[in-house]
Image (cartoon, grey):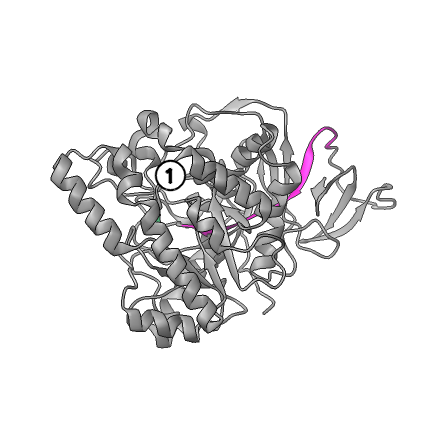
Amino acid sequence: MVNEGCTFRADVLVHGDRIERVATEGIGNARGAKEIIATRHHLLPGAIDDQVHFREPGLTHKEDIAHGSAAAAAGGITTFMEMPNTKPQTLTQELLEKKYKLGAMSSVVNFSFYMGVANDNLDEVLRTDTRTVCGLKAFLGSSTGNMLVDDPLTLDQLFRQAHMLLAIHAEDEGTIRENMRMAVARWGEDIPVEEHPCIRSAEACYLSSSHAVALAKEHGTRLHVLHISTAEELALFAPGPLIGKRITAEACVHHLWFTDADYHTRGTLIKWNPAVKSNADREAIRQGVKEGRIDVVATDHAPHTLEEKAMPYGRCPSGGPLVQHALPAMLELARQGVFTLEQVVEKMCHAPARLFNISDRGFIREGHKADLVLVDLDAPWTVTRDGLWSKCGWSPFEGQRFHSRVLRTWVNGRLAYADGKVDTGVRGERVRFER
Ligand code: DOR
């Protein structure tokens, strides 16, 4: 078992949807229990992904909750938090509750949905229930769906009045537009994808995230800055444990894995916002994760169809599917010595539970929900298209060899994934927050 900073031998007894006992000296009398012998395998808490785009409603040609959550289960992710840039965008309480109904109907894993912020919906935003909704989400840089919040007065009021966690996408729109103008002047219609990190530049990231951090400090906002992609931004965040922090940060697997050298081979399949940047940026983000400047590791799973991704740079949307391979990729980085196993579990399981005040998930503890994942750390396999669960049907990791494999995933005590198959009849729960 890998849990709470240690790796050790233990037995776990699950009863119903909860963990009843965790014992290092044998479980004792558990009559009628079905026994699973997992010698040489590792049991982890199910991962909690605080940033996915499952595209429902309205963009279900790219992804939907059924497929996205199945891919999550196959990847050892037992809880997701989903973004509001759907169609329609999640900008009213009514639309938000409709999404929760969709989640209850079709999600294999546990779910929460962010309330979206626009230039003109602060009244609705402030009505969001802190105990049943993960957070508020504002795009301070435009991306898929054009949900830009760029009115300075709105931003000021939002940071002043936000009554719960505010998650942001931070890229400065003016800088991006100017860089784009220069790229078009130079390349016309044929902008190479290698220009992406110059257009959505490190400067654009820093300008926006530093402005948001300054606003949060001024108003005492509970700010969570998503997908940090540059070395410069790390200085904005305090190192060390999460306890007491009002300003937190997330890194995504693609920024920890890829660098700008990969555009050459992967092309627009690794076009994300914010852009994958230099090796120095990747090294700094990895260091930030270890030092605690980055509190959680997530995916920003954001599928588009292959036809959309095959379009020329200027028209190709940013984003790609990741939930199925995030944990294997992080376990690969652990194998390479970049992180320890315990750090992977800390950043993908424990810390998201703490950061969002989820009191009964994210740890293997007696009384907690039985969200568990069993992995084999020594079972090499190669990512191929036929094993993918995401509706978009491709992966930026195709051809990648991983050494770790997810064997089984339990969601609230129910086996949701085993031996390559998702039980699509399993349903996750709406996550509750102790706030
Ligand atoms: O690359 C991205 N794609 N970044 C985002 O912030 C949005 C996402 C999407 O929804 O496609």
Give the quadrant of residue 184: top left
Asked if one can make out residue 379 in the rendered structure from this viewpoint, the answer is yes
Whether 195 is drawn above or below 431: the answer is above
Number of labels in the image equals: 1
Some atom of ligand 1 lies within 8 Å of the CB belonging to the residue at label 1: no
Q: Amino acid at mark 1?
A: Val
Whether 139 is drawn above or below 194: the answer is below
Residue 43: in magenta span: yes
> Could you say which is closer to the camera, residue 325 or residue 118?
118
Whether 25 is drawn above or below 90: the answer is above
Whether 206 is drawn above or below 11: the answer is below
Quadrant, the N terminus: top right
Residue 5: in magenta span: no
Instruction: Provide the residue designation for mark 1.
Output: 276
Quadrant, the C terminus: bottom right
Q: Residue at x 58, y 28 (%)?
A: 336
- Residue 264: where, in percent of width, then height? 31, 26
Q: Residue at x 80, y 44 (%)?
A: 32
- Residue 182: where, in percent of width, then height? 17, 43
Give the main secondary structure of the magenta stretch.
strand
Asked if one can make out residue 56 in the rendered structure from this viewpoint, the answer is no
Q: Is residue 136 left or right of residue 291?
A: left
Q: Residue at x 78, y 41 (%)?
A: 11
- Residue 123: where, in percent of width, then height? 36, 77
- Magenta-colored span: 38-52
Dot 1 falls on a residue whose secondary structure is loop
Give the quadrant of residue 194: top left
- Residue 409: where, in percent of width, then height? 60, 41
Q: Is residue 308 left or right of residue 36?
A: left
Q: Residues within 10 Å of mark 1 (few under 14, many from 20)?
A: many
